[in-house]
Image: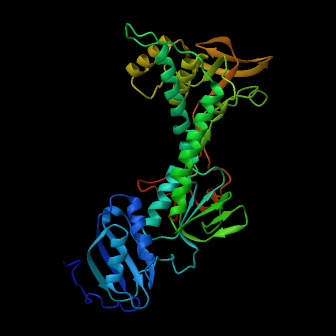
Amino acid sequence: MKLFKKKTAERGQGAPNGNQIELDIEGMTCDHCALHVQKALKQVDGVVEARVPSWKEKRAFVSVSGEVSETQLARAVEEAGYHVKEIHMKTGKGATPSNGGGREVDYDLVVIGTGGGGMGAAIRAAEMGRKVAIVEAGTIGGTCVNIGCVPSKALIRAAEAYHTAGHHPFAGLKTRAEGLDWPALIAQKDELVAELRQKKYVDVLEAYENIRLIRGRATLDAHGDVVVDGQQTLKTRKVVVATGARPKILPIDGVKEVEVLNSTTIMALKKQPASLLIIGGRAIALELGQAFARFGTKVTLLQRSPRLVPAHEPEISAGIEEALRNEGIEIFTGSTPQAIRQEKGEKVVTAMVNGETREFRAEQVLMAVGRTPNTQNMGLEAVGVELDKGGFIVVDEYLKTSNPKIYA
């Protein structure tokens, strides 16, 4: 059976030195398939470089040095579990990544940050055959898996199950919510985070031979290259800044003397609070507030705007407010916090509520009032990267900054 069509060389004939070979491959269905094929081709003697840009393109590009037959390449792909439909052999020197104006570089791309955006950029570049470094100063995985979507949704789902056990609408079913083990709940959440961080981030990075993980804090030098911990310079053609953001804390009186929670620290509490005062009235404030209320914590919510989630339609705001009030959450809109103090085992917040000064007391206070970008002290301004008034990087429709070398 004919495995593939002949192009410029006969079947089994050795490929001349410096040839680049293009293979049309069938059977790839995901990014890992592309990586599997790429690894298989790299193991063929005489192959200098092999890259599979994407499984969707159904192609592989191989640069060879010495005598490498089409049969060898096809066999490697077949043994990996895929099928070569055609091989195109192109004479001439194999393509290599441009180094940008002839300047010697260490990497085609350096990504700052290992969150979802940074990982996506690094993996895509690697699949295109580029040499990539990804720099991380903190925990691998960024916000979503470590302190965002994964842990919050784990607690939200647990709270939903606990609440439903004691508040379902079905006649004849006698269930009740009891026996909440807070340390066990938090431990299970932490185990899930660790498992997904390992499988979806650490293991994935290790699977890509042309992605190098470098630990340390990244800044930019005058050339737009990346400097790690002020010592190691990574010369690169392009940079992707994917440093994420952190919770914002309102600078009200007393906030430096009194510990307040944010969306990260509240999910790491060792003890469930009896009462919780939340400053904020958008997504994070509402979902965490409802979760803690469902666990049995007395929750009070202060929202500066006249209604909850003010960016959405008034009908949505009204529906959410009604649902939360029905679950026992106290809501005060038109509230502006002014000060916070500690009185024995309670935190006391003074706020203006629709023109009236009021005090609110709770065991814990959560500030959920937005996020601040992690763009400070990186050298962005020095290389001409424009920031908006909130410190966020300004980009165009292609995510390119005002410096054409840097994306975000």
Q: Name the residue located 67 percent from the left edge and 20 percent from the top edge.
A: 273
Is 242 left, or right, of 97 in this rendering? right
Q: Name the residue located 37 percent from the left edge and 75 percent from the top edge.
A: 76
Residue 60: percent from the left, percent from the top?
35, 72
Residue 289: percent from the left, percent from the top?
56, 22
The residue furthest top is 172
Residue 298's place in the image compared with 194, above or below, is above
The residue lying toward the viewer, choosing from 134 and 406, is 134
Is 73 left, or right, of 151 in this rendering? left
Residue 185's place in the image compared with 215, above or below, is above
Quarter placement of the N terminus: bottom left
Q: How many marks?
A: 0
Instruction: Give the image quarter of residue 24.
Output: bottom left
Residue 327: percent from the left, percent from the top?
50, 13
The residue lying toward the viewer, choosing from 2 and 90, is 2
Q: Name the residue located 29 percent from the left edge and 88 percent from the top edge.
A: 12
Q: Name the residue located 61 percent from the left edge and 17 percent from the top edge.
A: 297
Is 222 left, or right, of 202 in this rendering? right
Q: Is residue 390 visible?
A: no
Residue 190's place in the image compared with 279, above or below, is below
Residue 239: percent from the left, percent from the top?
54, 63
Residue 213's place in the image compared with 8, above or below, is above
Is 255 left, or right, of 393 in this rendering? right
Q: Is residue 161 visible?
A: yes
Instruction: Give the image quarter of residue 171.
Output: top left
